[in-house]
Amino acid sequence: MKVSNLPVGVEISGIDLAHEMDEANRTALRDCLAAHQLLVFRGQHLAPDEQIRVIETFGPVLDEWQDGKRYQYVSGKETSIKPGRLLFHSDNHFLPIPLELLSLYAEEVGSTATPTLFVDNIAGYARLPATLAARLERSEVVNRSFFHLGFSDQPARDLPEDLIGGPMARHPAVWRHPETGAPFVYLTELHAFRLGDLPAEESRNLLEQVFDVLYDPRYSYEHRWADGDLVVWNNRTVQHARGEVADASEEAFVPRSIRRVSVASKGVSDQFQFDPRVLTQINTGEKSFYRGKFGEQR
């Protein structure tokens, strides 16, 4: 097994994930993830159940849609998500218990398919000016989700206070890695609505200072997809983003079938009871982030 550094995380070669791994290899992968936060494997051939088996190396795989599959597609014809742009985020940051780990597998992608961008929250924290880092250490962040209104490409901090919101959670603005103890920024462009109870303008100014450091393109990793790629990352220490993805009916459409498997103890439906008004907006709104009825069997 060979490990090569990337701008964020590492690429691992010399391993065929379609075959059962022994405990030594599983331990090596867990250690590698703890040290580097993101793992890239190229040229793999993984059916859904094989991807699930690989990801069980890192923890319990979540049945996010409660349909028994334990996988879903984040782009492509089988996805429940509408095409478009996604700002930097950590999945389920707007819930009390966010997802622990994410994996994406490229089942079928065109040569010009939209890449995925990654940034490292640990490295981002280390680059913060000391005064700003100290300020964040004493702060909480209010995270809100507006997916039901179609806002996947606008920062939560710029949206009006009175919008009917989806899930919302407060988290410390700085977390510690549970294995290494390393501090990391836990703020995301998409979901950070406000820092604590600060006035909106002061909160926005502080958030933008953090994001200027965190999203500096010199420290991001752009993953350009090819068939058989598997990317695995710590959803709390790494954020991801995506540019525009066209719908299959559009002239600009490029095949991009990306399969997702996640690790967590609880998902959205385990932690949040949707307000009937929110469900109505999801299920009838033209701009909803989701296709069709929310949570329907696919």
Image (spheres, rainbow, N blue to C red):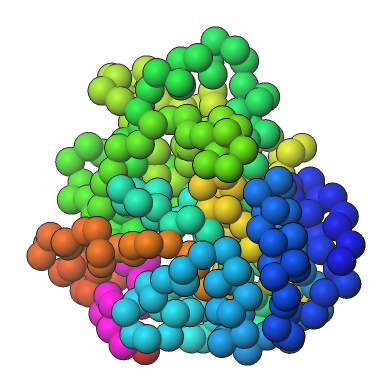
Which residue is farthest front? 23
Specify start and end residues of the magenta stretch as a single range.
Answer: 287-297
Which residue is at 56% across, 87% downward? 49
31 versus 50 height, above or below: above
207 versus 238 height, above or below: above
Locate the N terminus by quadrant. Answer: bottom right
Magenta stretch: includes residue 231? no
Image coords of residue 37 (percent x, y): 66, 49
207 versus 109 height, above or below: above
> Residue 10 is drawn in which quadrant?
bottom right
Image coords of residue 240 (percent x, y): 58, 53
The residue lying toward the viewer, choosing from 263 and 231, is 263
Does the rendering let one see residue 144?
Answer: no
Does the rendering let one see residue 268?
Answer: yes
Is residue 241 found left or right of 100 in the rendered image? right
Magenta stretch: includes residue 295? yes
Which residue is at 34% across, 77% downward? 65
Image coords of residue 105 (percent x, y): 64, 75
Is residue 249 found left or right of 117 in the rendered image? left
